Image: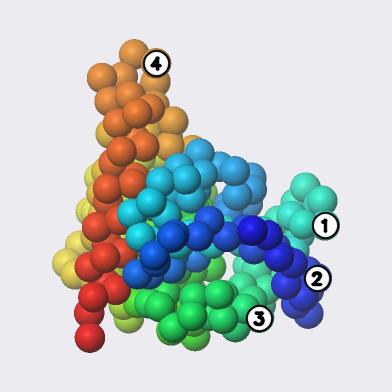
Amino acid sequence: MQCDVPTSVGPGRLTVSAAPEPTAVLWLGHGAGGGIDAPDLAVLASRLPDRGITVIRYEQPWRVAGKRVAARPATLDVAWLETAPAVRELAHGLPLVVGGRSAGARVACRTAASTGAAGVVCLAFPLHPPGRQDASRLDELREPDVPVLVLQGGRDPFGGAEQLVAELGTQTGVRVVEVPGADHGMKVAKASAFGPADVRELLTASVEGFVREVSSRP
């Protein structure tokens, strides 16, 4: 099911992959370089509903309008927050976990408190722009006061899993799961022993377990 949602910066679009008997809802945003058909977002939308988790993917207004350049972070946040009531209505009172890939993960972190999320799922969090170690987004990852799961490629040019763990230090609210050999798009080399099917299974199992865990908290 798809539905357009008006916001003050233009209409966004929700694509709902509904679970037959849902126990939680996972709301995901896309990155700055692609849409909701990104492989990691698509695999969660195709697999999690059969496991009792409804997945709602959100297309930002800039993407719906056919623009090629993403809106500024503050504009992304506005559209996301103004869409939250519609997502809550679709959730029918079920626990809501928010997240996204890359820029979408940043939006979810910055707005977690305002959306009342039970947890945040970050796919390929862009810790640093490539080659810009001085420009860190670590504070955004630390911002949510709810549990955060990060699935990070081992060779992500925006900051691999090992680097992310090292920079987080003793931060206990953020759990990092490495996707071995994966780049920023969660792709692995053809010769990798950890293949595409392994990536899909790791993403699915990790996110499912996290959503169930945070949804069961009082």
The answer to whether mark 2 and mark 1 are in CB contact below 8 A is yes
Give the numbered dot on residue 82. Answer: 3
Quadrant of the snapshot with the N terminus: bottom right
Query: Can you give x and y, in whole percent of width and height, for residue 122 in the image?
Result: 40, 58
Query: Can you give x and y, in whole percent of width and height, for residue 4 in the image?
Result: 74, 67
> Which amino acid, by three-letter code, is at mark 4?
Lys
> Mark 4 sits on what residue?
190
At mark 3, the secondary structure is helix
* Quadrant of the image occupied by residue 170: bottom left
> Mark 2 sits on what residue?
10
At mark 2, the secondary structure is loop
181, above or below 128, in the image: above
At mark 1, the secondary structure is loop
At mark 4, the secondary structure is loop
> Mark 1 sits on what residue?
65
Query: Can you give x and y, in whole percent of width and height, for residue 6 in the image?
Result: 77, 75
What's the CA distance linking mark 2 and mark 1? Answer: 8 Å
* Quadrant of the image occupied by residue 217: bottom left
Q: Which of marks 2 and 1 is nearer the N terminus?
A: 2
Q: Which residue lies furthest to the front in this view?
A: 20
Give the numbered dot on residue 181. Answer: none
Badge 3, how many Cα within 10 Å: few under 14, some, many 20+? some
